[in-house]
């Protein structure tokens, strides 16, 4: 560094020193009631937040740009900055100005960064979506091992999974972390995958991910002597988890969140669903990025925030384990048979605060009295739910959950006794400890209250003494207690004998203020009492937090149990309201759906109340047909049918009931969904290229338990190219992948393939033609579509009549050409009566009428031969075609 600049003020020197430690973050530098930003930070923040950029003093001869946000509103600004991709270092005053003065007249208040706020490390309710998790992830590759680990620090949920780099895309799509940690020097490819998932990539020094030091670090966090006590970990696992821990302790300044024991998620525990499939099936958001209209928005009937987060997880991470799925479905079935109980449990759950996140804040010492109140009331609600469930013979999942709900009576009594019900948000505001909880505090408070009545007495005395009945004792933050009179009375106060007692302090526009020695003493007493009261309250608060943390592990279990109960009751509520059934799951490779429906399309149709959704069967069996080739005109319902079956499989394995009359599903290992020619211009690849890359992924990855839906693959290129690709893809699925698949196509030529491929059958969505119009029946039945009805559909879309007529002529000619064995092009060029057809069958109406008009206007008898000839020339030039 250059030698200290004379012109640098001590405060600016302090700022620069602190800022040096956080070059990649904006520094929120606390000054009284504001967080101030300086230099480039100020310029960037002012622009991002749309706040005024000002300046303060000079640095090396130039103005110092500055902007600030008020402390009380800082959370909103923080959120805004984090969303815009910034990281923020929060620098607080670590002592008050009086303490600084004691160290020397010119001393600057001690300051330090207490927290680095990044997208993955948020805990405030205002900064988090209540119904979604907020994950911080880390990815590590050590030689031939690699691991993805992730944690939600607001709840302490920590997991890890072996994750080869090729699985990063799908995993990030599943978890949607806010931030991903990687070692410095990560490949561009990896960084790109992270960015594409919408997460912030944070590159850290290699040694953060050191696996040998990492094991000790993890042991220390969990208080175990040997890592083996926590589970089995490879080197990459250890490196990834310890990387998370290291980063958390750096950003939280040593204060670790309450971490649950790491849970390993084995890849084959869950249905593999890649990013494109998630997007296509619109699981948690629609293609246009909205929540409403997604599968989740239609199936989520949970009533608690933690329940919603668990349900989100169920939908995004369906299970492949038969036993797990059965256990969940049994819990749903139980509540289906117990409507009264379900209603009672759900109304108790509705009162439940977010216990998980309140507990998380307590652990991070970021909590307030209201978090303790939330925990207290959470315990009471849990006890109530326990009492409701205890009277029943419960399925295992619910029994286990119920067992976790009790045993907190002492803690709940303590919290109840200690806290007033309308406690402030922040402990430092005081006034949250209930009377009777601490005799010491009660004494001080009594003193304080007594002092207040003493002051009231003093006011009466002074009024008597001065003969000014309107005299008042008031209080403000600048002067403390003072005596106030109007200006007209003030002269008397300022002259002998009253001036012996009353000391002038201040004159304002309409009042004059005084104090007395006695009042000053009283004030000191009150202040002492108040600060002792606050100190004592903070001590009590810390004690209560410690008691809560003693119960941290069982309290987390309580929170998880309540979420489980909420999800089971919610799926049951949904099943009963919508008439869904419990699916039968087994080890076969069958997929038999009777009267299946698309939950989202059905809900949309219901909302419009115009038509009903037409339920359809789907019947794929390993002994007969594994693949259905679906043809039918546009708008018939092909895409809907494809998706509804994928969604039914997904819902079944999520542990939900399904929208069907009956469902029998052999466990699905992977779900793939592709739509031909999806527009993906944003990524700068041609749509056809995207389509082919995605199709290749399926053909390379789908195993014999996969469920594949392909919607008009090949649409993105010329007819013959597209047809051949679709053809070959279908053959590959049939011969090599041997998986269950639904294949929608508009290439009728493909329907002939069923003769050649044993396990492919044709199905079609029916339409009826009625007086030249097409009527969609939305019924799926076996067989091939007779024709495509494209022209009729175009008519519905409002194509001009002339174009429709012309299209019909072209279509007929093409079909005739094919029948007679010409190539399509030849049929087009040779046989088609080109534009004449348009002229005869649909002459342009306006031209016709003008000509008619002109003709009608002619009176032949009045024309000379020359005039007649001119007229013919004129008309001919005017209506020349
Ligand atoms: P395709 O893929 O054959 O062009 P879609 O699946 O996109 O057709 O369906 C078009 C529209 O038809 C849907 O938006 C929906 O409103 C309606 N639809 C589809 N399937 C059904 C059904 N089974 N019952 C009622 N309406 C349906
Ligand atoms: Mg379609």
Image (tube, rainbow, N blue to C red):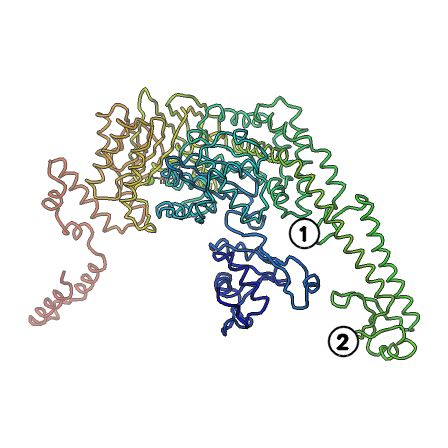
Q: Which residue is drawn at 35% across and 25% down?
A: 620
For disc 2, the marked residue is 508
Residue displayed at 82% across by 59% down = 526
- The tag on residue 426 is 1
Mark 1 or 2, closer to the camera: 1
Residue 821 horizontal/vertical position (percent): 11, 36
> Could one spot residue 555 in this view of the protein?
yes
Image height check: is 14 above or below 287?
below
**Quadrant of the displayed image that contains ligand 1:** top left
Residue 712 at what x, y percent from top left?
29, 38
Give SS at disc 2. loop
Image side of residue 467 versus residue 335, left or right? right
CA–CA distance in space, label 1 to label 2: 35 Å
Asked if marks 1 and 2 touch (Cβ < 8 Å), the reply is: no
Toward the front, the furthest residue is 3
Q: In terms of sequence position, does the residue under pointer 1 or pointer 2 come before the other?
A: 1
In the drawing, what numbered circle is on residue 332? none
Give the quarter of the figure containing the C terminus.
Answer: bottom left
Residue 142 location in percent, x, y? Answer: 40, 38
Q: What element carries label 1?
A: loop
Taking depth in this image into account, of 333 and 602 the one nearest to the observer is 333
Of residues 448 and 699, the one drawn nearer to the viewer in this rendering: 448
Q: Please say if 156 is above or below 396.
A: below
Characterize the local packing of mark 1: few (<14), some (14-19) or many (20 or more) Cα atoms within 10 angstroms: some
Number of on-image labels: 2
Q: Nearer the viewer, residue 314 or 651?
A: 314
- Whether residue 347 is visible: no
């Amino acid at each position: 560094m250059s030698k200290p600049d004379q012109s640098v003020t001590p405060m600016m020197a302090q700022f620069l020193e602190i800022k040096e430690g956080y070059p990649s973050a904006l520094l929120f530098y606390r000054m009284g009631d504001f967080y101030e930003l300086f230099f480039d930070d100020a310029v960037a923040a002012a622009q991002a937040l749309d706040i005024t950029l000002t300046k303060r003093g000079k640095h090396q001869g130039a103005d110092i740009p500055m902007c600030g946000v008020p402390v009380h509103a800082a959370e909103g600004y923080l959120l805004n900055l984090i969303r815009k991709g910034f990281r923020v270092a929060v620098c607080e005053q670590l002592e008050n100005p009086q303490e600084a003065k004691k160290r020397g007249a010119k001393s600057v208040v001690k300051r330090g960064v207490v927290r680095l706020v990044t997208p993955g490390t948020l805990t405030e309710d205002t900064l988090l979506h209540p119904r979604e998790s907020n994950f911080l992830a880390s990815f590590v590759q050590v030689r031939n091992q690699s691991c993805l680990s992730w944690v939600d620090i607001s709840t302490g949920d920590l997991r890890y999974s072996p994750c080869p780099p090729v699985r990063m895309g799908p995993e990030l799509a599943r978890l949607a972390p806010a931030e991903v940690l990687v070692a410095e020097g990560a490949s561009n490819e990896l960084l790109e995958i992270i960015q594409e998932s919408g997460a912030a990539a944070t590159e850290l020094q290699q040694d953060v991910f050191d696996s040998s030091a990492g094991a000790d670090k993890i042991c220390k966090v969990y208080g175990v002597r040997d890592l083996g006590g926590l589970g089995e970990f490879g080197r990459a696992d250890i490196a990834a988890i310890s990387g998370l821990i290291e980063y958390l302790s750096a950003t939280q300044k040593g204060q670790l969140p309450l971490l649950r024991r790491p849970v390993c998620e084995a890849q084959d525990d869950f249905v593999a669903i890649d990013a494109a499939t998630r997007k296509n099936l619109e699981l948690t958001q629609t293609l246009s990025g909205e929540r409403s209209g997604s599968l989740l928005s239609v199936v989520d009937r949970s009533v608690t925030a933690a329940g919603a987060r668990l349900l989100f997880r169920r939908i995004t991470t369906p299970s492949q384990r038969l036993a797990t799925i059965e256990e969940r479905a049994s819990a749903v079935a139980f509540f289906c048979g117990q409507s009264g109980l379900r209603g009672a449990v759900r109304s108790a759950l509705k009162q439940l605060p977010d216990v998980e996140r309140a507990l998380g804040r307590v652990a991070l010492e970021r909590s307030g009295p209201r978090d303790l109140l939330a925990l207290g009331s959470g315990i009471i609600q849990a006890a109530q739910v326990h009492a409701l469930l205890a009277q029943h013979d419960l399925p295992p999942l619910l029994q286990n959950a119920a067992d976790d709900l009790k045993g907190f009576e002492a803690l709940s009594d303590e919290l109840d006794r200690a806290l007033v019900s309308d406690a402030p948000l922040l402990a430092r505001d005081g006034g949250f400890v209930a009377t009777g909880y601490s005799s010491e505090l009660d004494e001080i408070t009594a003193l304080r209250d007594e002092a207040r009545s003493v002051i009231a007495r003093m006011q009466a005395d002074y009024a008597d003494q001065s003969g000014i009945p309107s005299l008042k004792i008031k209080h403000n933050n600048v002067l403390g207690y003072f005596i106030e009179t109007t200006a007209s009375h003030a002269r008397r106060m300022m002259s002998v004998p009253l001036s012996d007692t009353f000391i002038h302090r201040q004159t304002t526009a309409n009042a004059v203020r005084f104090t007395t020695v006695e009042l000053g003493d009283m004030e000191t007493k009150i202040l002492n009492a108040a600060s002792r009261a606050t100190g004592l309250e903070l001590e009590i608060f810390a004690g209560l937090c410690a008691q809560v943390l003693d119960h941290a592990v069982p309290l987390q279990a309580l929170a998880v149990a309540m979420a489980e109960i909420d999800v089971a009751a919610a799926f049951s509520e949904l099943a009963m309201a919508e008439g869904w059934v419990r699916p039968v799951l087994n080890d076969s490779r069958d997929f038999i759906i009777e009267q299946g429906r698309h939950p989202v399309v059905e809900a949309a149709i219901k909302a419009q109340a115009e038509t009903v959704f037409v339920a359809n069967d789907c019947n794929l069996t390993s002994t007969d047909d594994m693949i259905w080739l679906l043809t039918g005109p546009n708008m018939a319902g092909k895409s809907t049918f494809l998706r509804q079956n994928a969604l039914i499989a997904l819902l079944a394995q999520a542990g939900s009931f399904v929208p069907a009359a009956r469902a029998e599903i052999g466990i699905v290992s992977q779900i793939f969904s592709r739509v031909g020619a999806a527009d993906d211009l944003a990524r700068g690849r041609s749509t056809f290229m995207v389509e082919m890359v995605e199709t290749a992924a399926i053909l390379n990855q789908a195993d014999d338990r996969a469920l594949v839906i392909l919607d008009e693959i090949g649409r993105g290129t010329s007819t013959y190219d597209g047809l051949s690709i679709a053809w070959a893809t279908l053959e590959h699925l049939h011969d090599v992948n041997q998986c269950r698949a639904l294949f929608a196509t508009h290439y009728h030529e493909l329907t002939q393939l069923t003769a050649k491929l044993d396990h492919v059958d044709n199905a079609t969505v029916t339409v009826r033609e009625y007086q030249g119009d097409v009527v969609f029946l939305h019924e799926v039945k076996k067989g091939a579509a007779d024709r495509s009805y494209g022209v009729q559909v175009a008519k519905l879309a409002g194509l001009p009549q002339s174009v429709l007529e012309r299209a019909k002529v072209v279509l007929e000619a093409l079909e005739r050409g094919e029948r007679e064995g010409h190539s399509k092009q030849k049929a087009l060029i040779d046989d088609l009566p080109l534009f004449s057809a348009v002229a005869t069958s649909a002459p342009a109406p306006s031209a016709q009428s003008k000509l008619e008009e002109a003709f009608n206007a002619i009176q032949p008898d009045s024309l000379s031969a020359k005039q007649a000839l001119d007229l013919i020339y004129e008309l001919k030039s005017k209506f020349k075609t």
